[in-house]
């Protein structure tokens, strides 16, 4: 077995180590996606006379065997293979003989990489949309349960105005729904078939790109073959930029929960099973998951920055630099996925301490309300502001429950409109489900079996 580009010399071992990097490890995630793209390509090659029906049959059987070996953890990618694409072709030669040597006709390795990542990321994005949706539902459940639970509102971290747990939680739900909308829009750009670009300039063969588009369940062909090449990394960056937005939200939630679960605040409590202990202090129950969420949000952002810095000065056409965009993309997706699951678990288990929240309502939290009461009696706001501000000591006790009920226009604590947020979420989840079903049906038809493209 040999490298796809092997000729009449051996590569220096240091250069091999440097150029291969960890692609031979990363590509285990992409084996099912490459098998899908390879079978689509082989089917198309048979339709234009490059492969016989018997050769196509043997390649399909070989690819299905590779999928089985991969599922069993028995498909090896060696450093000498360089990557999973070479390992698949070498195995196909073992299983299908000369047919395995023909499958690369009309393709470049870059063509394979772009297509495998596109097939993988198309499904991965839908998975992250669903995971974000799960978190939004958990947050909305908490918001609904505690829509009438008062919570001190803060600006500059100081006591500000009456708020509620429902208002606090609902804000993050709506923020994440908008991030899902961004991901859904990005998915439409992602859902175009790059296969057939070869090295970025096409080939003098009658490749049928519409056929492979249909076989893999893409919505359309990514038309210009140079654009296909130039989109490598850029498509991944587009997704990472939105994942950066999602984890930015998760980081803010984490910071709030860390702060508001401190004994000094006592607004929320984290169950012990979501906390880790100290190696020296027996009493400690630390919110390490939430602390790491803050750090991991920075890592996701760094993944996008890494790709952006790789791409920004490259000339058009293929450059080996593109190889370095794979790891940060896969890493950013993995971190976002587990972060969403962790935060969903946190909201499902979070304890809301109603008495602790109400205890945070000091008299001065009602200062703005008092000024507006004076306005209602005919005083100008500026005079009312000054009157209350100069006599804060005269503010009396008020009912926290009544204070949040008194805010009744849409989007406030007395009128959260949570049903509208839930309706928007359902619409986006239905779109994602329809897209997933279409992909699954296309790939099952192509491969003759159900596939799990999202290998952890």
Image: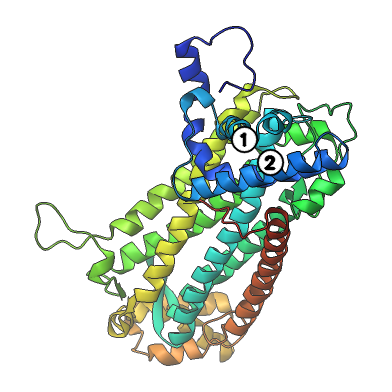
Q: Is residue 355 left or right of residue 132?
A: left
Question: Which numbered disc flags the more N-terminal residue, 2 or 1?
Answer: 2
The picture places residue 373, in percent across and down from the top left corner, at 51, 88
Asked if 316 appears above or below 447 in the picture, the reply is above
The picture places residue 394, in percent across and down from the top left corner, at 34, 84
For residue 32, which numbered disc appears in the image? none
Q: Is residue 194 visible?
A: no
SS at circle 1: helix
Residue 74 found in image quarter? top left
Asked if 326 appears above or below 247 in the picture, the reply is above
How far apart, in angstroms, are the residues tagged by discs 2 and 1?
Answer: 7 Å
Q: Residue at x 69, y 42 (%)?
A: 58
Q: Residue at x 68, y 57 (%)?
A: 448
SS at circle 2: helix
**What count of labels does the image hold?**
2
The picture places residue 123, in percent across and down from the top left corner, at 63, 55
How crowded pointer 1 is (Cα within 10 Å; few <14, some 14-19, many 20+) is rated as many
Q: Residue furthest front?
A: 54
CB under 8 Å between discs 2 and 1: yes
Asked if 349 appears above or below 21 in the picture, the reply is below
The picture places residue 83, in percent across and down from the top left corner, at 55, 30
* Residue at mark 2: 59
Asked if 194 appears above or below 272 in the picture, the reply is above
Residue 266 found in image quarter? bottom left
Q: Is residue 78 visible?
A: yes
The residue closer to the viewer here, 337 or 23, is 23
* Residue at mark 1: 92
Q: Residue at x 35, y 52 (%)?
A: 292
For the N terminus, the quadrant is top right
The residue closer to the viewer here, 168 or 300, is 300
């Amino acid at each position: 077995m040999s490298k796809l580009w092997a000729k009449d010399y051996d590569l220096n071992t240091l250069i091999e180590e440097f150029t291969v990097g960890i692609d031979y490890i990363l590509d285990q995630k992409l084996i099912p996606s490459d098998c899908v793209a390879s079978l689509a390509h082989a089917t198309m090659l048979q339709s234009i006379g490059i492969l016989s029906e018997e050769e196509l049959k043997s390649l399909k059987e070989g690819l299905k065997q590779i999928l089985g070996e991969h599922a069993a953890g028995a498909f090896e990618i060696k450093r000498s293979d360089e990557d999973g694409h070479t390992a698949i072709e070498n195995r196909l030669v073992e299983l299908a003989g000369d047919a395995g040597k023909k499958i690369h006709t009309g393709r470049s390795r870059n063509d394979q990489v772009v297509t495998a990542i596109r097939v993988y990321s198309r499904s991965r994005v839908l998975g992250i949309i669903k995971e974000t949706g799960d978190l939004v539902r958990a947050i909305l459940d908490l918001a609904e349960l505690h829509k009438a639970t008062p919570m001190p509102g803060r600006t500059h971290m100081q006591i500000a105005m009456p708020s509620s747990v429902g208002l606090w939680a609902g804000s993050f739900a709506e923020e994440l729904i908008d991030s899902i909308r961004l991901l859904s829009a990005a998915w439409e750009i992602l859902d175009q078939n790059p296969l057939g670009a070869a090295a970025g300039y096409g080939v003098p063969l009658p490749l049928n790109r519409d056929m492979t588009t249909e076989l893999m369940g893409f919505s359309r062909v990514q038309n210009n073959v140079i654009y296909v090449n130039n989109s490598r990394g850029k498509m991944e960056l587009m997704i990472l930029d939105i994942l950066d937005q999602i984890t930015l939200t998760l980081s803010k939630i984490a910071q709030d929960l860390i702060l508001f679960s401190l004994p000094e605040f006592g607004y929320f409590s984290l169950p012990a099973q979501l906390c880790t202990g100290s190696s020296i202090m027996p009493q400690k129950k630390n919110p390490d998951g939430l602390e790491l969420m803050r750090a991991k949000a920075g890592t996701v952002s760094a993944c996008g920055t890494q790709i952006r810095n790789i791409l920004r000065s490259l000339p058009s056409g293929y450059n080996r630099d593109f190889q370095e965009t794979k790891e940060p993309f896969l890493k950013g997706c993995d971190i976002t996925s587990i972060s969403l699951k962790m935060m969903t678990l946190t909201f499902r288990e979070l304890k809301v301490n109603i008495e602790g929240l109400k205890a945070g309502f000091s008299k001065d939290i009602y200062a703005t309300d008092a000024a507006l009461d004076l306005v209602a009696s005919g005083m100008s706001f500026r005079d009312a502001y000054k009157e209350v501000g100069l006599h804060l000591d005269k503010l009396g006790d008020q009912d926290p429950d009544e204070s949040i009920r008194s805010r009744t226009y849409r989007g406030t604590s007395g009128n959260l409109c949570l049903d509208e947020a839930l309706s928007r979420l359902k619409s986006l989840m239905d779109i994602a489900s329809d897209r997933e079903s279409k992909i699954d049906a296309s790939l099952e038809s192509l491969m003759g079996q159900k596939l799990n493209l999202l290998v952890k």
